[in-house]
Image (tube, rainbow, N blue to C red):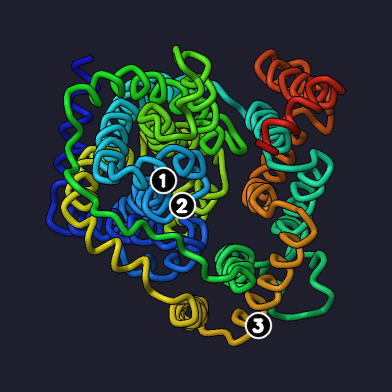
Amino acid sequence: MMETFSHLSLGFGVALTMQNIALCFVGCLVGTLIGVLPGVGPIATISILLPITFGLDPTGALIMLAGIYYGAQYGGSTTAILVNIPGEATAVVTTLDGHQMAKQGRAGIALGTAAIGSFVAGCVATVAIAALGAPLTKMALLFGPAEYFSLMVMGLCFAVVLARGSILKAFCMIMLGLLLSTVGTDLETGQERLSFGIPALSDGIDFSVLAMGVFGFAEVLRNLENPEARDVVKAKIGRLLPGWSDIKQSVAPVLRGTAIGGILGILPGNGAVLGPFASYTMEKKLAKDPSRFGKGAIEGVAGPESANNAGAQTAFIPLLTLGIPPNAVMALMVGAMTIHGIIPGPQVMTRNPELFWGMIASMWIGNLMLLVINLPLVGMWVKLLQVPYRLMFPAILIFCCIGIYSVNNQPMDVAFTAMFGLFGYLLIKLGFEPAPMLLGFVLGKLMEEKLRQALIISRGSFVTFVERPISAGLLVVAVLVLVVALLPSISKKRDEVFTE
Protein backbone atom coordinates (compact mmCIF):
# COMPACT_ATOMS: atom_id res chain seq x y z
CA MET A 1 0.00 0.00 0.00
CA MET A 2 2.78 2.42 0.97
CA GLU A 3 4.59 1.57 -2.26
CA THR A 4 1.46 2.46 -4.28
CA PHE A 5 1.16 5.79 -2.44
CA SER A 6 4.80 6.62 -3.16
CA HIS A 7 4.23 5.76 -6.84
CA LEU A 8 1.13 7.97 -6.95
CA SER A 9 3.04 10.88 -5.40
CA LEU A 10 5.60 10.44 -8.19
CA GLY A 11 2.74 10.39 -10.72
CA PHE A 12 1.15 13.58 -9.40
CA GLY A 13 4.56 15.25 -9.40
CA VAL A 14 4.80 14.45 -13.14
CA ALA A 15 1.15 15.22 -14.02
CA LEU A 16 1.02 18.55 -12.14
CA THR A 17 3.76 20.25 -14.18
CA MET A 18 2.43 23.22 -16.18
CA GLN A 19 3.11 21.54 -19.54
CA ASN A 20 1.36 18.29 -18.63
CA ILE A 21 -1.63 20.10 -17.08
CA ALA A 22 -1.97 22.10 -20.31
CA LEU A 23 -1.68 18.96 -22.47
CA CYS A 24 -4.24 17.15 -20.30
CA PHE A 25 -6.62 20.11 -20.67
CA VAL A 26 -6.11 20.21 -24.46
CA GLY A 27 -6.74 16.46 -24.70
CA CYS A 28 -9.93 16.66 -22.59
CA LEU A 29 -11.18 19.71 -24.53
CA VAL A 30 -10.50 18.12 -27.95
CA GLY A 31 -12.00 14.84 -26.73
CA THR A 32 -15.19 16.61 -25.62
CA LEU A 33 -15.31 18.49 -28.92
CA ILE A 34 -15.04 15.39 -31.10
CA GLY A 35 -17.46 13.57 -28.82
CA VAL A 36 -19.99 16.37 -29.33
CA LEU A 37 -19.56 16.55 -33.11
CA PRO A 38 -21.26 13.49 -34.67
CA GLY A 39 -19.19 11.58 -37.20
CA VAL A 40 -15.74 12.33 -35.79
CA GLY A 41 -14.69 9.72 -33.24
CA PRO A 42 -11.59 9.35 -31.04
CA ILE A 43 -9.99 6.80 -33.40
CA ALA A 44 -9.99 9.24 -36.32
CA THR A 45 -8.94 12.18 -34.12
CA ILE A 46 -6.02 10.37 -32.46
CA SER A 47 -4.93 9.14 -35.91
CA ILE A 48 -4.96 12.73 -37.18
CA LEU A 49 -3.10 14.10 -34.14
CA LEU A 50 -0.37 11.44 -33.98
CA PRO A 51 2.09 13.50 -36.11
CA ILE A 52 1.67 16.48 -33.74
CA THR A 53 2.94 14.40 -30.80
CA PHE A 54 6.37 13.95 -32.41
CA GLY A 55 7.55 17.24 -30.93
CA LEU A 56 6.31 16.41 -27.41
CA ASP A 57 7.91 14.31 -24.70
CA PRO A 58 6.37 10.80 -24.49
CA THR A 59 4.57 11.37 -21.16
CA GLY A 60 2.93 14.61 -22.30
CA ALA A 61 1.95 13.10 -25.66
CA LEU A 62 0.27 10.06 -24.07
CA ILE A 63 -1.47 12.21 -21.42
CA MET A 64 -2.99 14.31 -24.22
CA LEU A 65 -4.03 11.30 -26.34
CA ALA A 66 -5.55 9.56 -23.31
CA GLY A 67 -7.51 12.74 -22.51
CA ILE A 68 -8.95 12.70 -26.04
CA TYR A 69 -10.14 9.11 -25.58
CA TYR A 70 -11.93 9.39 -22.24
CA GLY A 71 -12.99 12.98 -22.99
CA ALA A 72 -14.89 11.74 -26.04
CA GLN A 73 -17.01 9.54 -23.75
CA TYR A 74 -18.18 12.66 -21.89
CA GLY A 75 -18.85 14.66 -25.07
CA GLY A 76 -20.73 11.83 -26.76
CA SER A 77 -23.50 12.05 -24.14
CA THR A 78 -24.17 15.74 -24.94
CA THR A 79 -25.01 14.96 -28.57
CA ALA A 80 -26.96 11.84 -27.63
CA ILE A 81 -29.16 13.77 -25.18
CA LEU A 82 -29.67 17.02 -27.12
CA VAL A 83 -29.66 15.83 -30.75
CA ASN A 84 -30.54 12.12 -30.50
CA ILE A 85 -27.33 11.30 -32.41
CA PRO A 86 -24.59 9.43 -30.50
CA GLY A 87 -21.36 11.41 -30.84
CA GLU A 88 -19.48 8.23 -29.89
CA ALA A 89 -20.32 4.53 -30.32
CA THR A 90 -20.54 4.10 -26.54
CA ALA A 91 -23.23 6.81 -26.34
CA VAL A 92 -25.74 4.92 -28.52
CA VAL A 93 -27.68 3.66 -25.50
CA THR A 94 -27.85 7.15 -23.95
CA THR A 95 -30.04 8.35 -26.83
CA LEU A 96 -32.86 6.01 -25.76
CA ASP A 97 -33.74 7.76 -22.50
CA GLY A 98 -31.50 10.84 -22.56
CA HIS A 99 -33.23 12.41 -25.56
CA GLN A 100 -36.66 11.59 -24.14
CA MET A 101 -35.67 13.40 -20.92
CA ALA A 102 -34.60 16.40 -23.03
CA LYS A 103 -37.97 16.42 -24.82
CA GLN A 104 -39.67 16.46 -21.40
CA GLY A 105 -37.72 19.60 -20.44
CA ARG A 106 -35.17 17.69 -18.33
CA ALA A 107 -32.14 18.03 -20.63
CA GLY A 108 -30.11 19.71 -17.87
CA ILE A 109 -30.84 16.90 -15.39
CA ALA A 110 -29.85 14.29 -18.02
CA LEU A 111 -26.60 16.12 -18.83
CA GLY A 112 -25.78 16.63 -15.15
CA THR A 113 -26.46 12.98 -14.30
CA ALA A 114 -24.32 11.83 -17.24
CA ALA A 115 -21.42 14.09 -16.21
CA ILE A 116 -21.54 13.17 -12.51
CA GLY A 117 -21.88 9.43 -13.29
CA SER A 118 -18.96 9.68 -15.73
CA PHE A 119 -16.84 11.50 -13.12
CA VAL A 120 -17.52 8.89 -10.41
CA ALA A 121 -16.87 6.00 -12.81
CA GLY A 122 -13.67 7.61 -14.11
CA CYS A 123 -12.31 8.11 -10.58
CA VAL A 124 -13.16 4.54 -9.49
CA ALA A 125 -11.63 3.10 -12.68
CA THR A 126 -8.45 5.11 -12.12
CA VAL A 127 -8.18 3.67 -8.60
CA ALA A 128 -8.55 0.20 -10.15
CA ILE A 129 -5.71 0.92 -12.59
CA ALA A 130 -3.47 2.11 -9.74
CA ALA A 131 -4.33 -0.94 -7.61
CA LEU A 132 -3.97 -3.55 -10.36
CA GLY A 133 -1.01 -1.97 -12.15
CA ALA A 134 1.78 -3.24 -9.90
CA PRO A 135 0.49 -6.84 -9.36
CA LEU A 136 -0.24 -7.35 -13.06
CA THR A 137 3.15 -5.95 -14.03
CA LYS A 138 4.90 -8.36 -11.63
CA MET A 139 2.86 -11.23 -13.10
CA ALA A 140 3.74 -10.13 -16.64
CA LEU A 141 7.45 -10.30 -15.79
CA LEU A 142 7.01 -14.10 -15.55
CA PHE A 143 6.09 -14.13 -19.25
CA GLY A 144 8.59 -15.33 -21.84
CA PRO A 145 8.29 -15.12 -25.66
CA ALA A 146 5.99 -18.19 -25.79
CA GLU A 147 3.60 -16.71 -23.19
CA TYR A 148 3.50 -13.35 -24.96
CA PHE A 149 2.73 -14.99 -28.29
CA SER A 150 -0.08 -17.06 -26.74
CA LEU A 151 -1.44 -13.99 -24.93
CA MET A 152 -1.63 -12.09 -28.22
CA VAL A 153 -3.34 -15.05 -29.92
CA MET A 154 -5.92 -15.03 -27.11
CA GLY A 155 -6.38 -11.27 -27.45
CA LEU A 156 -7.04 -11.57 -31.18
CA CYS A 157 -9.54 -14.39 -30.57
CA PHE A 158 -11.43 -12.14 -28.14
CA ALA A 159 -11.30 -9.37 -30.74
CA VAL A 160 -12.89 -11.68 -33.32
CA VAL A 161 -15.71 -12.74 -30.99
CA LEU A 162 -16.45 -9.25 -29.63
CA ALA A 163 -16.33 -7.46 -33.00
CA ARG A 164 -19.65 -6.41 -34.47
CA GLY A 165 -21.12 -8.45 -37.32
CA SER A 166 -19.97 -11.77 -38.71
CA ILE A 167 -17.26 -13.74 -36.91
CA LEU A 168 -15.89 -14.79 -40.31
CA LYS A 169 -15.58 -11.14 -41.41
CA ALA A 170 -13.86 -10.18 -38.16
CA PHE A 171 -11.44 -13.11 -38.57
CA CYS A 172 -10.68 -11.98 -42.15
CA MET A 173 -9.94 -8.46 -40.88
CA ILE A 174 -7.56 -9.80 -38.22
CA MET A 175 -5.72 -11.89 -40.82
CA LEU A 176 -5.53 -8.93 -43.22
CA GLY A 177 -4.02 -6.79 -40.44
CA LEU A 178 -1.43 -9.51 -39.70
CA LEU A 179 -0.61 -9.73 -43.43
CA LEU A 180 -0.16 -5.95 -43.75
CA SER A 181 2.21 -5.97 -40.76
CA THR A 182 4.61 -8.24 -42.70
CA VAL A 183 5.04 -5.75 -45.58
CA GLY A 184 8.60 -4.39 -45.79
CA THR A 185 12.14 -5.62 -45.18
CA ASP A 186 12.66 -8.63 -42.91
CA LEU A 187 14.98 -7.48 -40.13
CA GLU A 188 16.74 -10.85 -39.88
CA THR A 189 17.23 -11.81 -43.53
CA GLY A 190 17.09 -8.37 -45.19
CA GLN A 191 14.65 -9.82 -47.74
CA GLU A 192 11.82 -7.57 -48.92
CA ARG A 193 8.34 -9.00 -48.39
CA LEU A 194 5.15 -8.00 -50.23
CA SER A 195 6.65 -4.69 -51.35
CA PHE A 196 6.07 -5.45 -55.08
CA GLY A 197 9.19 -3.50 -56.01
CA ILE A 198 7.74 -0.21 -54.70
CA PRO A 199 10.56 1.68 -52.87
CA ALA A 200 8.07 3.45 -50.56
CA LEU A 201 7.01 0.04 -49.16
CA SER A 202 10.53 -1.25 -48.45
CA ASP A 203 10.31 0.06 -44.86
CA GLY A 204 6.79 -1.29 -44.42
CA ILE A 205 3.44 0.47 -44.08
CA ASP A 206 3.57 3.40 -41.70
CA PHE A 207 1.18 2.99 -38.78
CA SER A 208 -0.12 6.57 -38.97
CA VAL A 209 -0.76 6.21 -42.74
CA LEU A 210 -2.92 3.11 -42.24
CA ALA A 211 -4.77 4.48 -39.19
CA MET A 212 -5.45 7.92 -40.66
CA GLY A 213 -6.61 6.43 -43.97
CA VAL A 214 -8.87 3.68 -42.65
CA PHE A 215 -10.35 5.79 -39.85
CA GLY A 216 -9.82 9.49 -40.73
CA PHE A 217 -10.47 9.61 -44.48
CA ALA A 218 -12.94 6.70 -44.49
CA GLU A 219 -15.04 8.24 -41.68
CA VAL A 220 -15.36 11.49 -43.64
CA LEU A 221 -16.46 9.59 -46.77
CA ARG A 222 -18.97 7.55 -44.76
CA ASN A 223 -20.48 10.63 -43.10
CA LEU A 224 -20.83 12.49 -46.42
CA GLU A 225 -23.54 9.92 -47.29
CA ASN A 226 -25.70 10.84 -44.33
CA PRO A 227 -28.17 13.73 -44.61
CA GLU A 228 -27.71 16.56 -42.11
CA ALA A 229 -30.88 15.84 -40.12
CA ARG A 230 -30.29 17.04 -36.56
CA ASP A 231 -33.21 16.89 -34.17
CA VAL A 232 -31.84 19.53 -31.76
CA VAL A 233 -34.06 19.98 -28.72
CA LYS A 234 -35.63 23.46 -28.78
CA ALA A 235 -36.69 23.46 -25.11
CA LYS A 236 -34.55 25.15 -22.46
CA ILE A 237 -31.80 22.99 -20.97
CA GLY A 238 -32.77 24.01 -17.42
CA ARG A 239 -30.83 23.33 -14.23
CA LEU A 240 -27.87 20.97 -14.50
CA LEU A 241 -27.69 19.61 -10.95
CA PRO A 242 -30.08 16.69 -10.34
CA GLY A 243 -32.43 16.85 -7.37
CA TRP A 244 -32.37 14.50 -4.35
CA SER A 245 -34.92 12.09 -5.86
CA ASP A 246 -32.88 11.90 -9.10
CA ILE A 247 -29.70 11.22 -7.13
CA LYS A 248 -31.38 8.40 -5.17
CA GLN A 249 -32.51 6.79 -8.44
CA SER A 250 -29.05 7.18 -9.99
CA VAL A 251 -26.66 6.02 -7.24
CA ALA A 252 -27.14 2.25 -7.69
CA PRO A 253 -27.09 2.38 -11.55
CA VAL A 254 -23.88 4.46 -11.44
CA LEU A 255 -22.15 1.92 -9.17
CA ARG A 256 -23.40 -1.07 -11.19
CA GLY A 257 -22.48 0.62 -14.48
CA THR A 258 -18.99 1.40 -13.15
CA ALA A 259 -18.43 -2.24 -12.17
CA ILE A 260 -19.77 -3.65 -15.48
CA GLY A 261 -17.91 -1.15 -17.67
CA GLY A 262 -14.68 -1.53 -15.69
CA ILE A 263 -14.66 -5.32 -16.12
CA LEU A 264 -15.68 -5.33 -19.81
CA GLY A 265 -13.20 -2.53 -20.64
CA ILE A 266 -10.29 -4.88 -19.90
CA LEU A 267 -11.50 -7.44 -22.45
CA PRO A 268 -9.87 -7.33 -25.91
CA GLY A 269 -12.07 -6.43 -28.85
CA ASN A 270 -15.19 -4.34 -28.23
CA GLY A 271 -15.33 -4.78 -24.45
CA ALA A 272 -15.49 -1.04 -23.69
CA VAL A 273 -18.26 -0.59 -26.29
CA LEU A 274 -20.32 -3.45 -24.83
CA GLY A 275 -20.27 -1.95 -21.31
CA PRO A 276 -23.11 0.60 -21.81
CA PHE A 277 -25.31 -2.00 -23.55
CA ALA A 278 -24.80 -4.50 -20.72
CA SER A 279 -25.49 -1.81 -18.12
CA TYR A 280 -28.72 -0.71 -19.82
CA THR A 281 -29.92 -4.32 -20.09
CA MET A 282 -29.22 -4.92 -16.40
CA GLU A 283 -30.99 -1.73 -15.26
CA LYS A 284 -34.04 -2.61 -17.34
CA LYS A 285 -34.19 -6.12 -15.87
CA LEU A 286 -33.75 -4.86 -12.28
CA ALA A 287 -36.33 -2.07 -12.63
CA LYS A 288 -39.72 -2.46 -10.89
CA ASP A 289 -41.35 -0.91 -13.98
CA PRO A 290 -39.31 -1.76 -17.13
CA SER A 291 -41.86 0.07 -19.30
CA ARG A 292 -40.33 3.41 -18.12
CA PHE A 293 -37.20 2.68 -20.15
CA GLY A 294 -37.17 4.36 -23.53
CA LYS A 295 -39.50 7.05 -22.16
CA GLY A 296 -37.06 9.10 -20.08
CA ALA A 297 -35.86 6.82 -17.24
CA ILE A 298 -32.89 8.48 -15.52
CA GLU A 299 -31.36 5.05 -14.77
CA GLY A 300 -31.04 4.56 -18.56
CA VAL A 301 -28.66 7.52 -18.61
CA ALA A 302 -26.79 7.07 -15.32
CA GLY A 303 -25.82 3.39 -15.77
CA PRO A 304 -24.60 3.37 -19.40
CA GLU A 305 -22.74 6.69 -19.04
CA SER A 306 -20.88 5.36 -16.00
CA ALA A 307 -20.13 2.10 -17.84
CA ASN A 308 -18.64 3.77 -20.93
CA ASN A 309 -16.27 5.98 -18.88
CA ALA A 310 -15.17 3.13 -16.61
CA GLY A 311 -14.50 0.95 -19.67
CA ALA A 312 -12.57 3.72 -21.44
CA GLN A 313 -10.15 3.99 -18.52
CA THR A 314 -9.74 0.32 -17.53
CA ALA A 315 -8.85 -0.35 -21.19
CA PHE A 316 -5.44 1.11 -20.24
CA ILE A 317 -4.76 -1.78 -17.82
CA PRO A 318 -3.78 -4.45 -20.41
CA LEU A 319 -2.00 -1.78 -22.47
CA LEU A 320 0.19 -0.45 -19.65
CA THR A 321 0.84 -3.76 -17.86
CA LEU A 322 1.00 -6.35 -20.66
CA GLY A 323 1.52 -4.22 -23.76
CA ILE A 324 -1.62 -5.71 -25.35
CA PRO A 325 -4.12 -3.20 -26.81
CA PRO A 326 -7.72 -4.27 -26.03
CA ASN A 327 -9.30 -2.08 -28.73
CA ALA A 328 -8.49 0.09 -31.76
CA VAL A 329 -7.87 3.27 -29.73
CA MET A 330 -5.40 1.43 -27.51
CA ALA A 331 -3.74 0.11 -30.69
CA LEU A 332 -3.19 3.74 -31.65
CA MET A 333 -1.70 4.35 -28.20
CA VAL A 334 0.72 1.45 -28.84
CA GLY A 335 1.63 3.19 -32.10
CA ALA A 336 2.24 6.46 -30.25
CA MET A 337 4.43 4.70 -27.66
CA THR A 338 6.55 2.92 -30.29
CA ILE A 339 6.94 6.20 -32.22
CA HIS A 340 8.51 7.64 -29.06
CA GLY A 341 10.77 4.62 -28.59
CA ILE A 342 8.81 3.06 -25.70
CA ILE A 343 8.11 -0.67 -25.86
CA PRO A 344 4.66 -1.37 -24.38
CA GLY A 345 4.62 -4.06 -21.71
CA PRO A 346 5.64 -4.75 -18.11
CA GLN A 347 8.97 -2.97 -18.62
CA VAL A 348 7.13 0.36 -18.92
CA MET A 349 6.50 0.44 -15.16
CA THR A 350 10.11 -0.34 -14.26
CA ARG A 351 11.92 1.58 -17.00
CA ASN A 352 9.50 4.51 -17.36
CA PRO A 353 7.78 4.90 -13.96
CA GLU A 354 7.24 8.64 -14.61
CA LEU A 355 5.22 7.81 -17.73
CA PHE A 356 3.22 4.97 -16.11
CA TRP A 357 2.24 6.77 -12.91
CA GLY A 358 2.08 10.20 -14.58
CA MET A 359 -0.60 8.90 -16.95
CA ILE A 360 -2.61 7.39 -14.08
CA ALA A 361 -2.43 10.61 -12.03
CA SER A 362 -3.40 12.66 -15.08
CA MET A 363 -6.65 10.68 -15.35
CA TRP A 364 -7.81 12.02 -12.00
CA ILE A 365 -6.94 15.55 -13.07
CA GLY A 366 -8.60 14.97 -16.46
CA ASN A 367 -11.84 13.76 -14.86
CA LEU A 368 -12.01 16.96 -12.79
CA MET A 369 -11.33 19.05 -15.88
CA LEU A 370 -14.06 17.25 -17.83
CA LEU A 371 -16.61 17.98 -15.11
CA VAL A 372 -15.82 21.69 -15.50
CA ILE A 373 -15.60 21.57 -19.32
CA ASN A 374 -18.91 19.76 -19.79
CA LEU A 375 -21.39 21.32 -17.37
CA PRO A 376 -20.74 25.11 -17.41
CA LEU A 377 -19.89 25.17 -21.14
CA VAL A 378 -22.91 23.18 -22.33
CA GLY A 379 -24.29 26.26 -24.15
CA MET A 380 -21.12 26.45 -26.26
CA TRP A 381 -21.40 22.76 -27.19
CA VAL A 382 -25.01 23.32 -28.31
CA LYS A 383 -23.80 26.10 -30.65
CA LEU A 384 -21.14 23.79 -32.09
CA LEU A 385 -23.82 21.26 -32.99
CA GLN A 386 -25.02 23.77 -35.58
CA VAL A 387 -21.72 23.69 -37.55
CA PRO A 388 -22.59 22.30 -41.03
CA TYR A 389 -20.72 19.20 -42.16
CA ARG A 390 -19.88 20.81 -45.52
CA LEU A 391 -17.52 23.16 -43.65
CA MET A 392 -16.22 20.67 -41.09
CA PHE A 393 -15.20 17.73 -43.28
CA PRO A 394 -13.01 19.58 -45.86
CA ALA A 395 -11.12 21.15 -42.94
CA ILE A 396 -10.55 17.66 -41.44
CA LEU A 397 -9.22 16.30 -44.76
CA ILE A 398 -6.82 19.23 -45.21
CA PHE A 399 -5.59 18.80 -41.63
CA CYS A 400 -5.09 15.04 -42.24
CA CYS A 401 -3.02 15.66 -45.39
CA ILE A 402 -0.81 18.26 -43.69
CA GLY A 403 -0.31 15.98 -40.67
CA ILE A 404 0.57 12.85 -42.64
CA TYR A 405 2.96 14.76 -44.95
CA SER A 406 4.77 16.25 -41.94
CA VAL A 407 5.71 12.78 -40.61
CA ASN A 408 8.24 11.84 -43.32
CA ASN A 409 7.87 14.71 -45.83
CA GLN A 410 6.85 12.09 -48.43
CA PRO A 411 4.05 12.87 -50.94
CA MET A 412 3.60 9.09 -51.36
CA ASP A 413 2.41 8.90 -47.74
CA VAL A 414 -0.51 11.19 -48.59
CA ALA A 415 -1.33 9.05 -51.65
CA PHE A 416 -1.20 5.83 -49.60
CA THR A 417 -3.42 7.42 -46.94
CA ALA A 418 -6.00 8.32 -49.59
CA MET A 419 -5.84 4.74 -50.95
CA PHE A 420 -6.39 3.31 -47.48
CA GLY A 421 -9.24 5.81 -47.03
CA LEU A 422 -11.03 4.43 -50.10
CA PHE A 423 -10.24 0.89 -48.96
CA GLY A 424 -11.62 1.61 -45.47
CA TYR A 425 -14.79 3.11 -46.96
CA LEU A 426 -15.22 0.00 -49.12
CA LEU A 427 -14.81 -2.22 -46.05
CA ILE A 428 -17.53 -0.28 -44.20
CA LYS A 429 -19.90 -0.55 -47.18
CA LEU A 430 -19.34 -4.32 -47.35
CA GLY A 431 -20.04 -4.75 -43.63
CA PHE A 432 -16.44 -5.32 -42.47
CA GLU A 433 -15.34 -3.63 -39.25
CA PRO A 434 -11.87 -2.03 -39.71
CA ALA A 435 -10.94 -2.00 -35.99
CA PRO A 436 -9.86 -5.69 -35.83
CA MET A 437 -7.58 -5.06 -38.83
CA LEU A 438 -5.77 -2.30 -36.92
CA LEU A 439 -5.38 -4.61 -33.89
CA GLY A 440 -3.95 -7.31 -36.14
CA PHE A 441 -1.56 -4.82 -37.76
CA VAL A 442 -0.26 -3.51 -34.43
CA LEU A 443 0.14 -6.96 -32.86
CA GLY A 444 1.48 -8.58 -36.04
CA LYS A 445 5.08 -7.42 -35.70
CA LEU A 446 5.13 -8.21 -31.97
CA MET A 447 3.67 -11.68 -32.62
CA GLU A 448 6.24 -12.44 -35.31
CA GLU A 449 9.06 -11.29 -33.04
CA LYS A 450 7.87 -13.38 -30.06
CA LEU A 451 7.19 -16.42 -32.29
CA ARG A 452 10.72 -16.31 -33.66
CA GLN A 453 12.25 -15.83 -30.20
CA ALA A 454 10.26 -18.76 -28.77
CA LEU A 455 11.29 -21.04 -31.65
CA ILE A 456 14.96 -20.03 -31.36
CA ILE A 457 14.93 -20.82 -27.62
CA SER A 458 13.21 -24.18 -28.24
CA ARG A 459 15.41 -24.97 -31.27
CA GLY A 460 12.48 -24.87 -33.67
CA SER A 461 10.04 -26.95 -31.62
CA PHE A 462 6.42 -25.74 -31.62
CA VAL A 463 5.81 -27.97 -28.59
CA THR A 464 7.20 -25.17 -26.42
CA PHE A 465 3.85 -23.35 -26.69
CA VAL A 466 1.98 -26.23 -25.00
CA GLU A 467 4.80 -27.37 -22.67
CA ARG A 468 4.81 -24.11 -20.72
CA PRO A 469 1.75 -24.01 -18.40
CA ILE A 470 0.86 -20.31 -18.79
CA SER A 471 1.23 -20.42 -22.59
CA ALA A 472 -0.84 -23.62 -22.83
CA GLY A 473 -3.55 -22.13 -20.59
CA LEU A 474 -3.82 -18.99 -22.72
CA LEU A 475 -4.09 -21.04 -25.93
CA VAL A 476 -6.80 -23.23 -24.37
CA VAL A 477 -8.79 -20.10 -23.43
CA ALA A 478 -8.38 -18.78 -27.00
CA VAL A 479 -9.67 -22.03 -28.53
CA LEU A 480 -12.58 -22.26 -26.05
CA VAL A 481 -13.64 -18.66 -26.79
CA LEU A 482 -13.81 -19.38 -30.53
CA VAL A 483 -15.54 -22.76 -30.12
CA VAL A 484 -18.18 -21.36 -27.73
CA ALA A 485 -18.81 -18.35 -30.01
CA LEU A 486 -19.36 -20.69 -32.99
CA LEU A 487 -21.98 -22.83 -31.21
CA PRO A 488 -25.32 -22.23 -32.98
CA SER A 489 -27.21 -21.13 -29.84
CA ILE A 490 -24.44 -18.76 -28.69
CA SER A 491 -23.89 -17.44 -32.22
CA LYS A 492 -27.59 -16.63 -32.58
CA LYS A 493 -27.65 -14.87 -29.21
CA ARG A 494 -24.50 -12.90 -30.14
CA ASP A 495 -26.11 -11.73 -33.40
CA GLU A 496 -29.23 -10.62 -31.50
CA VAL A 497 -27.15 -8.61 -29.00
CA PHE A 498 -25.25 -6.75 -31.72
CA THR A 499 -28.45 -6.16 -33.71
CA GLU A 500 -30.07 -4.58 -30.65
Q: Secondary structure at mark 2?
A: loop
Looking at marks 1 and 2 on the same chain, the residue that comes earlier in the sequence is marked by 2
Residue bearing mark 1: 99
For the residue marked with disc 2, what is the amino acid?
Answer: Asn
Residue 46's x, y, as percent? 45, 60
Q: Secondary structure at mark 1?
A: helix
Tell me the distance, in whole angstroms, between the alpha carbons under discs 3 and 1: 41 Å
Residue bearing mark 3: 415
Left or right: 411, with 463 as reference point: left
Tell me the distance, in whole angstroms, between the alpha carbons under discs 1 and 2: 6 Å
Seen from the viewer's position, the closer of residues 462 and 156 is 156
Looking at marks 2 and 3 on the same chain, the residue that comes earlier in the sequence is marked by 2
Q: Quadrant of residue 87?
A: bottom left
Looking at marks 3 and 1 on the same chain, the residue that comes earlier in the sequence is marked by 1
Q: Residue at x 76, y 44 (%)?
A: 170
Q: On screen, 161 above or below 414?
A: above
Residue 488's x, y, as percent? 87, 23
Q: Residue at x 69, y 42 (%)?
A: 164
- Residue 183 visible (yes or no): yes
Q: On screen, 233 above or below 306?
A: below
Q: Nearer the viewer, mark 3 or mark 1?
A: 1
